[in-house]
Image: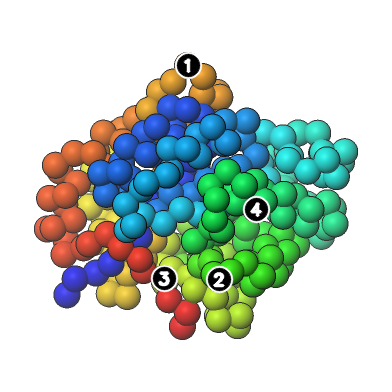
Amino acid sequence: MTRILTLCADDFGLGPGISAGIARLANSQRLSAVSCITNSPHWAEQAEHLQGLPESVDVGLHLNFTEGKPLSARLARRWPVLPSLPTLIARAHLHALPQAEMRNEVHAQLRAFIHAYGEPPRFIDGHQHVHHLPGLRETILDMTEHVQPLPAVRNTGRVLGPGAGFKRWMIERTGGRALAKALKQRVLAHNPALLGAYDFEELDYGRLMRGWLKMLPPEGGLLFCHPGLHDPNDPPDAIAAARSRELAYLASKDFTEDLAEAGVVLGRAWQTA
């Protein structure tokens, strides 16, 4: 049985090298989707590289609340610099997020996407999965329901391995399972399963990919990845070496052979059930 994998490259717009590497893979149809960070100072100029992508590649919004600065003046007055992921998770679960300011920022990042790309996102997700956090989750889903055509939303409630057991557990338990329930209640399109979590230290990305392809369920799923080229104008990047390894593998003959061996094709695995 052929299974469908939505292969999504995250962090487009974060830096010139990252964006160039992702655009290269997308134009070669080695990706199903590209997720964009719009509060980056590089976003507007890098968005030009998304024009003319193959129709098979969807472009979406990667909402960012943990890196860089806010786009909206309202949140910037409260948070001149966005908090770390652990801080954001703690505040979200303590119900201590500035709700009005967060809502303003979500809409600002959506407007920046539409302004630079020229059309609404095909899907919405979050940098470091922040879109599933309590307080943010409801705001983002409310916004999503007012975007036309209706975007899909990355489901983080069912994360499949290999490895990274604690990371997968954290993704599901910090808000992923609640998000999965909400997506079904609202009848919003989403991926049946999520793959791609690892510690960025593994040197053999192909080995990881073969493990993920083996665990892809019959109904398909979404695998998030972080490929990129190196560019001196990129911001400081703790996973730069991993980005290079991912790019090299995804551009290689080994990747296409691994897909064929596993009986997997790249495509859209969104569902509403």
Decide which of 115, 199 is in the foreground and name it: 115
**CA separation in Å, label 1 and label 3:** 36 Å
Q: Which mark is residue 110?
A: 4
Quick one: SS at disc 1?
A: loop
Give the mark nearer the N terminus: 1 vs 3. 1
Image: 70 above or below 218: above
Give the mark nearer the N terminus: 2 vs 1. 2
Q: Residue at x 12, y 58 (%)?
A: 261
In front: mark 1 or mark 4?
4
The residue that disc 2 covers is 150
Quick one: SS at disc 3?
A: loop
The residue that disc 3 covers is 270
The residue that disc 1 covers is 232
Quick one: SS at disc 4?
A: helix
In front: mark 2 or mark 1?
2
- Categorize mark 4 by other alpha carbons within 10 Å: few (<14), some (14-19), many (20+): many
Decide which of 72, 117 is in the foreground and name it: 117
In front: mark 3 or mark 4?
4
Q: Are marks 1 and 3 in contact (CB under 8 Å)?
A: no
**Residue 1 makes an appearance in the image:** yes
* Amino acid type at image mark 2: Leu
Q: Residue at x 19, y 46 (%)?
A: 255
Give residue 213's position: percent from left, percent from top: 25, 59
Image: 107 above or below 9: below
Give residue 182's position: percent from left, percent from top: 62, 76
